[in-house]
Image (tube, rainbow, N blue to C red):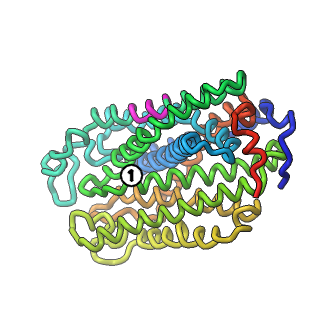
Amino acid sequence: MSTHAASATAVLPAAAPAASNANKALGIGLVGIALTGLGLLVPGNASAVAVAWLVGIVFWTSIAIGMLMLIMIHHLTDAGWSVALRRQFEHGLSGFKWLLILFLPLLLASWFGAGDIVWPWGNVNHVLHAGETVGQDPLYQHKSPVLNIHTFSVISVLLFAFWIWISARLRKASFAQDIDGEIKWTQMNYVTSASGIALTALTLTAAAFCWIMSLEYHWASTIYGMWFFSDCIRGALSVGVLVQLWLYARGDFKGILNTKHLHSTGMWVHAFTAFWAYVAVSQYILIWTSNIPEETFWYNIRELNHDGSINQWWYVGLALVYCHFLVPFLLLLSYKNKIVPRRIAPMAFWIFSTVLLDLVYNIVPVLKDAHGNAQPFVSFTLVWITTSVMGVGGVVAWSYLKSFGATKLIPIRDPRIVECLTHHE
């Protein structure tokens, strides 16, 4: 890859191509949303569609959160090599407001329809597998101050409101610096990141607890926020690699992106691959070792049916061990696999896909049959998951491309831009 400085034309916004691609992305998103909506016409399919929609929302929200965290890490560490990539993440943050809008149907369905359409605790008359209702469950009564639709809705909206607000601050300062070059904008983003990174860590943990862990509210894991954080970062980095290679192939990043940028990004991907494994395995081993029924049941329903036979989710869990950790970890040990586009691109897409699989593994088993068995992995729900991911992703991509066409390609007046452009081995 070229290591020359960026040309004058490379830093200008590519408005026309971006607008064209944005319209295509929006079209794909609307088609995905419409196809998902068709699933509601199938009798008795509402919960499967709603859970699939939750997968789509959480998946793309996790990527946006990962981008937000990486931007703040960039500012706090005063990193130079990632300045150009940071700008692409800043465009990605524009999707938060649309993710909030797309999340609202789940809240509205819980408010005005079946309260337990996604989260069982949303309806106090929901019958648990022991025969008692949610309202009669002592554990629910203990958690009811948080697990009720009123508090849950307020928390969810506040989470998005915070992400939208801090993203707007970071984007405003970065884009303003393109115009006047004032160092105060760099200092402003440093201050924002210093306070915002801890708050973002707390909010992503709250999101993981409220949206995912509460699907099985009898179960709890104190490390669950760390698991979600690792998927957020891995998803964001995989998208970052794919976006950089897309811009290079288009010609935008010619003279900007070089092998050292890919190597540095690849090392981050490798590090968080190991981090995900550490968190996921620690959670499993601690629960398996303690062997407390109140904790082990979460894994049991992802491994066994009520009659003791192995279910399809056992194979999904095994696939995560190999596909989400072992394969990328071993392949990314190679230097060439980090820097050669035709090698790193498939790896990035692989990780992108396995992050989605990990979220499916954590969310979809909430759908159960009359015996309490998790709905099989291979089911029609996969169709709605696919259309949901496509629908939400199309809207997020549209938002990214609209922002992309309205600003400079890279932060041309960032004090670290020269360090970024001359980032060599």
> Which residue is nearer to you in this view: 401 or 360?
401
User: Start and end of the magenta stretch?
Assistant: 158-165
Quadrant assignment for the C terminus: bottom right
Judged left or right of residue 67, residue 366 is left
Residue 296 sits in quarter? bottom left
| Residue type marked 1 | Gly
State the image coordinates of residue 307 (x, y, percent, origin top left): 28, 76
Which residue corresponds to the image point at 25% horizontal and 46% vertical from the top-left? 121
Judged left or right of residue 233, residue 412 is right
State the image coordinates of residue 56 (x, y, percent, origin top left): 50, 47
Q: Is residue 391 visible?
A: no
> Which residue is nearer to you in this view: 420 or 145?
420
Q: Which residue is mark 1?
A: 225
Examine the rendered structure and indicate whether residue 122 appears above or below residue 218: above
Is residue 162 shown in magenta?
Answer: yes
Q: Is residue 181 visible?
A: yes
Answer few, some or many: residues within 10 Å of disc 1's Cα (few below 14, many 20 plus, some between 14 and 19): many
Which residue corresponds to the image point at 46% horizontal and 57% vertical from the top-left? 360
Quadrant assignment for the N terminus: bottom right
Is residue 150 shown in magenta?
Answer: no
Q: What's the magenta bit mostly, secondary-structure-wise?
A: helix
Kind of element beneath mark 1: helix
State the image coordinates of residue 421 (x, y, percent, origin top left): 77, 45
